[in-house]
Amino acid sequence: MNSQLKPIALHSPLVKGREELTAIVERYAQTEGVTPTAWPALSFFRADSPSDRSCALYEPCLGLLLQGDKHILLGEERFEQQNGHYLISSIDVPVSAQVMRASYNQPCLCITLRLNPVRISEWLSEVKLPKPATATARGLALSPISTEILDPLLRLVRLLDSPHDLPLLAPLIERELIYRLLTGEQGARLAQIATAGGQGQHIARAIQWLKQHYNKPLRIRDLANMVNMSASSLHHHFREITAMSPLQYQKLLRLHEARRLLLTEGCDVATAAHRVGYESPSQFSREYSRQHGAPPLRDVNRLRQVANDATSSADAR
């Protein structure tokens, strides 16, 4: 799953653009974790050291890694994202992500831009999509960044320093960026989230239902009827796009939400298990341990300690 960056001249526009973008992101992302920006769809991420695996739900987005290396696990499939590579997520997918290389002097830095399927669909009747590099319909893919994509992204990020221009110019640049993504290496993959009547849209509807009803019993036949698919077709295309079955997807949603409840709302284990749809706290603890690498309370205590250490480190600077 690992694309290799092509050799590029030391002073090429691509290198200089990446250097400028990296400097802007580092200036805004002063603390570890996610930093929102004045443009709601745009956010930055920083890590000053390698991390353990953490869970996340990737929405349809562009994610460009500027420094460091990350590993992303989708089901049993591993993606190795190197700096200078962008990730396209064409559908909501629960993943485990891990920062592999980062330091205080060379932090892991990433830009994420949420993608609006409506804006993507506006281009579909006008754009000739490239043939996909592979036959897979997987909802996650990596590619090396190109000048065509980097240039509008850099102009969008520059606008953060011009707040009066941002609301007028950002939508135009974002539209241009979507055009560049659609005509780039991952264009066909990205288009699947906005193609009316396509299998991608059926699966997107199924995912929306699962996100809204993750704590309810799941009957595959009922879900298939809801999205106008047969049960076998739903199962096949769902796995093809997300690398997991609908039941596995629901379980990950439950375990992600349970972790949030334990960490931010102070729930006890039994209450968190019940709120996300488990009838048996012991089954919940077993599945939580398999997913997160430790029983619920031990995992949450470790995460709190990591957060405290990061805060202490930031205060000491």
Image (cartoon, rainbow, N blue to C red):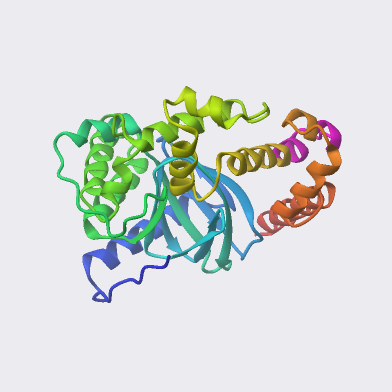
- Residue located at (41% from left, 68% from top): 2
Q: From the viewer's side, name the closer residue of 57 and 8.
A: 57
Q: From the viewer's side, name the closer residue of 63 and 240.
A: 240
| Quadrant assignment for the N terminus | bottom left
- Residue located at (32% from left, 40% from top): 192
Residue 230 at x, y = what percent?
A: 45, 32
Residue 135 at x, y = what percent?
A: 32, 56
- Residue located at (34% from left, 33% from top): 117
Task: Classify residue 49 as left or right of residue 203.
Answer: right
Examine the image and state in which quarter residue 141 appears. bottom left
- Residue located at (56% from left, 58% from top): 76
Is residue 266 shown in magenta? yes
Residue 206 at x, y = what percent?
A: 49, 31
Is residue 175 shown in magenta? no
What secondary structure is the magenta-colored segment mainly? helix
Above or below, 110 against 242 in this view is: below
Residue 65 visible to the viewer: yes
Task: Classify residue 82 as left or right of residue 117.
Answer: right
Total labels drawn? 0
Residue 316 at x, y = what percent?
A: 70, 59
Q: Which residues are magenta?
A: 260-272
Above or below, 232 against 188 in this view is: above
| Quadrant assignment for the C terminus | bottom right
